[in-house]
């Protein structure tokens, strides 16, 4: 049975306190969310009656070395239409660079609405194959153009991040729902996975940020 984590809690991904063991050859980090129904009143008018607003939440992963830094920020790639993509094929996994050059961590796709049940976005990582130079993976979620659209985590409910092993067994889940403390917060450092004593640990973080641009957070690393 999966462990429901609280903010700040850390667990061993390979084996829990109940004696269950998990296959970390491929681990799925799943992200899900719902948007609060606006109903009537001011918010209802702002978002068009009682309809649910479209939110685009993006899952991002920073691969950090033993110094807590992103060692390779990748290169600049020019698309056929002339647009340039920075941070391409580096140690940052996001919607414009969805697969790490090693092939050991990738983003499966970009869900722009959060509609439906289950995971809305997934990052898959082969933890047992990940190069030893990577000591920690930080998982961040941002609301695309959240500041422009006046969208923030105070309007998001039933948000979660969970870890699932190679056999589909849910290891751990960390959930949160938006409240007034998240008003104006357009990104979230949700969780991290890190090496410890020849295994991998998962820590629930839940730290909100004002910015909706993950590049602002990347500057710290």
Image (tube, rainbow, N blue to C red):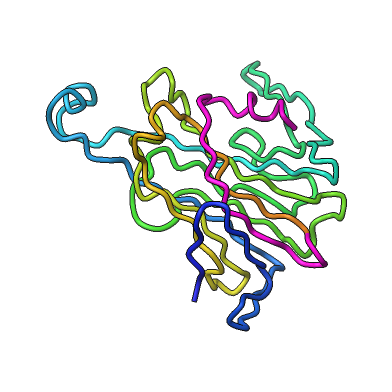
The reply, left or right, for residue 31 in relation to residue 218 is left
The residue sitting at 60% across, 47% down in the picture is 107
Does 12 appear above or below 119?
Answer: below
Number of numbered tags placed on the structure image = 0
Q: Nearer the viewer, residue 5 or 124?
A: 5
Q: Quadrant of residue 45?
A: top left
Q: Position of residue 63 (x, y in %)?
A: 74, 44
User: Where does the image place residue 211, in percent across and percent down from the top left?
Assistant: 53, 24
Judging depth in this view, the residue of 177 and 162 nearest the camera is 177
Specify whether residue 59 is painted magenta.
no
What is the quadrant of residue 132 in the picture? bottom right
- Whether 200 is among the magenta residues is yes
Q: Is residue 123 left or right of residue 74?
A: left
Residue sitting at 64 percent across and 25 percent down? 215
Front residue of this view, candidates 90 and 9 = 9
Highlighted range, magenta: 196-221
Q: Residue furthest left?
A: 40
Give the quadrant of residue 201.
bottom right
Which image quarter is the C terminus in? top right
Measuring from the top left, give residue 29's x and y in whole percent.
57, 56
Above or below residue 45? Residue 140 is below
The structure residue drawn at horizontal position 65% and vertical position 67%, both measured from the top left corner, is 13
Q: Is residue 96 left or right of residue 176?
A: right
Residue 200 image position (x, y, % from top left):
73, 63
The one nearer the camera, 137 or 57, is: 137
Q: Is residue 193 above or below residue 90?
A: below
Q: Is residue 11 above or below residue 186?
A: below
Residue at image point 66% right, 45% down: 138
């Amino acid at each position: 049975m999966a462990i429901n984590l609280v903010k700040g809690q850390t667990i061993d991904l390979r084996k829990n306190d109940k004696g269950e063991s998990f296959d970390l050859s491929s681990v799925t980090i799943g992200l899900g969310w719902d948007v609060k129904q606006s109903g009537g009143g001011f918010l209802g008018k702002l978002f068009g009656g009682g309809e649910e607003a479209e939110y685009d939440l993006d899952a991002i992963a920073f691969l950090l070395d033993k110094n807590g830094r992103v060692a390779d920020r990748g290169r600049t790639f020019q698309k056929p239409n002339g647009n340039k993509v920075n941070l391409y094929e580096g140690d940052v996994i996001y919607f414009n660079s969805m697969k790490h050059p090693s092939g050991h961590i990738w983003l499966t796709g970009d869900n722009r609405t959060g509609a439906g049940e289950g995971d809305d976005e997934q990052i898959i990582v082969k933890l047992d194959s990940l190069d030893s130079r990577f000591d920690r993976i930080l998982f961040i979620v941002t609301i695309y153009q959240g500041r422009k659209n006046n969208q923030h985590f105070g309007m998001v409910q039933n948000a979660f991040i969970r870890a699932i092993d190679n056999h589909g067994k849910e290891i751990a889940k960390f959930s949160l729902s938006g409240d007034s403390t998240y008003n104006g917060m357009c990104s979230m450092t949700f969780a991290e996975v890190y090496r410890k004593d020849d295994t991998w640990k998962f820590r629930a973080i839940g730290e909100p940020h004002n910015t909706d641009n993950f590049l602002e957070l990347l500057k710290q690393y």
